[in-house]
Each structure stands twice: as structure tokens, then as C-alpha cells.
Amino acid sequence: MGLSCSCGDFDKSDYDRWWEPARHAVPPAGEACCECDAPLPAGLKAQAICAMEVFNPTEPCPANPDDSDEDLSDAEFKHLEQAYDAWAARNGWDSESERCERAAETCYRCERCEDLADSIEALGYCMIGPRELIECHCEYVDEHLEGPELHWVRDAAGVLHPRRMTRRDFAMRWIRQRPRRIYSFWRWSVPSRIRGLWWRTQAAIMRRLGYRYSYDSSSKSYRYVRPA
């Protein structure tokens, strides 16, 4: 989404999928940071961001005793209430939005990425979703700080770290983009120039032969015609 997001007051009932605010929990063994791929310490809590989604449960919803028009005894009412509450708890029923919600995915951040995300959000930006921190960080540096472009680079262990781009980085990016530029040139630019050259050549020849490019009412189209 980037730092350009301007969602205003958030209301989850407007969405079918959203991120819950960060909390702290012990990640599964072997879990890595969703931003920089750094291994998370085993047994220690890390920032956890949960993706929630709306779903349709396969389990049928029992009758809500509060909506029943029948004259129920206390025992019947309590039995229906317990069944309804148990179904609601199992299926994540939200009474305010009147829909079932569940956790679809949980992502974890290392302490460094957590601090970086918090510091950017503290400046008034919207919540940074998982796997969006690098993009937001580069965007913030580009907009507010002077100096060479920022990017994140993997070290020998495969962990991403932010650093300013060097001349070598710019040169390597130019080399990587060179094949795409060559392909684009031959795929689009060359044919366009050939068509333009052919059109100009054709127009010059037809003018020398006495033809003019004008609207032909018989064919209802523009074409070269010889004046009468």
C-alpha cells in the first residue's frame, strides 16, 4: 500500500480482509521475520500481526433464543442460549457486524523491523502491513531525507539490511535493466519508426502522383484520391 495510504477512520465492517493491530506472541519454531527474513529467537515473544477474513461457516447456525417468538421455559432458553453461544465462539461470530470472522494468517517481525515500523507509524502514517515495511521505508527516505536512493540488501546469511545505493549498485541495476530496454526498443520503438517512415514515404509518393489524402464519401473513409 505504501505511505500514500489515506484510509481515514478504519471500520473493519467495510472490508472482507484486514490486518489486526500488532500484538506480541511467541512465534512457531523456525519462524523468520516477514520483512527482513531474520530468524526469530526461539521461545521469545515477537510482534505478531494477524490477517483476519470474513468466511461462511459450514456448520449451521442454531436458533438465537433472543429472536425466538416461542414461549420458552427457563431450561429451554438456557439450552438454546448455550448452543448459540458455543456456535458463535467456534465460528468467530461478530454480533456488531453480524458476520463470522477468523484468523487467516499471522506474520511476525523481528525487534529491529518492529522498531522501524513503529517509528514510521508514529509520524502519522497508516499502519504498515506485513511485507510492506521495506517499500514504506524506502519511500519515506526518498521523500524526506537527502542522499542516494535506499534499498535493502541480503547479507551472507540471507537477511535483508537497509543501505544507501552506491555507484556499483546503480551500474548493476542499469545492466539488469539493459535487456528489457533493448527488447522494448526492438519490440515497440523500431516497428513504430518503420511505420512512420513508410507513412511519410507513401504520402510523398502519392502527392507526386497527384493524389490527395481526403475523405471519400463513397467508401465513407479517408483514402488517397485523385482530384477530378
Image: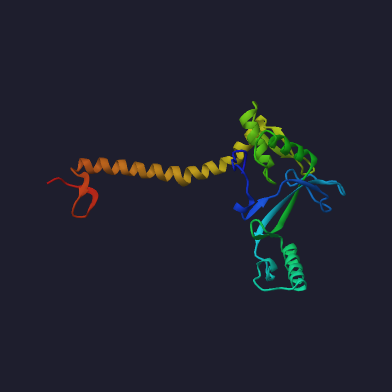
Q: Residue furthest left?
A: 228
Q: Please state the horizontal and vertical placement of residue 85, each as a whole percent of the image.
A: 74, 65
Q: Out of 24 and 69, give the one closest to the viewer.
A: 69
Of residues 187 and 7, the one drawn nearer to the viewer in this rendering: 7
Q: Please name whichever residue, 187 or 140, is drawn nearer the observer in this view of the structure.
A: 140
Asked whether the viewer can see residue 204, the reply is yes
Q: x, y percentage for residue 73?
A: 74, 73
**Who is closer to the viewer here, 136 or 122?**
122
| Number of dots carrying numbers | 0
For this view, does 55 lie left or right of residue 115?
A: left
Way the structure is coloured: rainbow
The location of residue 5, given as percent across then percent down, is 60, 41
**Residue found at the far top of this picture:** 146
Across and down, in percent, residue 33 comes to 77, 46
Q: Residue at x 21, y 55 (%)?
A: 219
Image position of 99 with respect to 2: above or below: below
Is 75 above or below relative to 154?
below
Corner quadrant of residue 61: bottom right
Q: Quadrant of residue 177?
A: top right
**Which image quadrant is residue 203 in?**
top left
Residue 149 appears in the rendering: no
Residue 11's place in the image compared with 65, above or below, is above
* Residue at x-position 80% and y-position 51%: 31
In the rendered image of this protein, does residue 147 appear above or below residue 72?
above
Looking at the rendered image, the quarter that the N terminus falls into is: top right
For residue 195, side relative to residue 73 (left or right): left
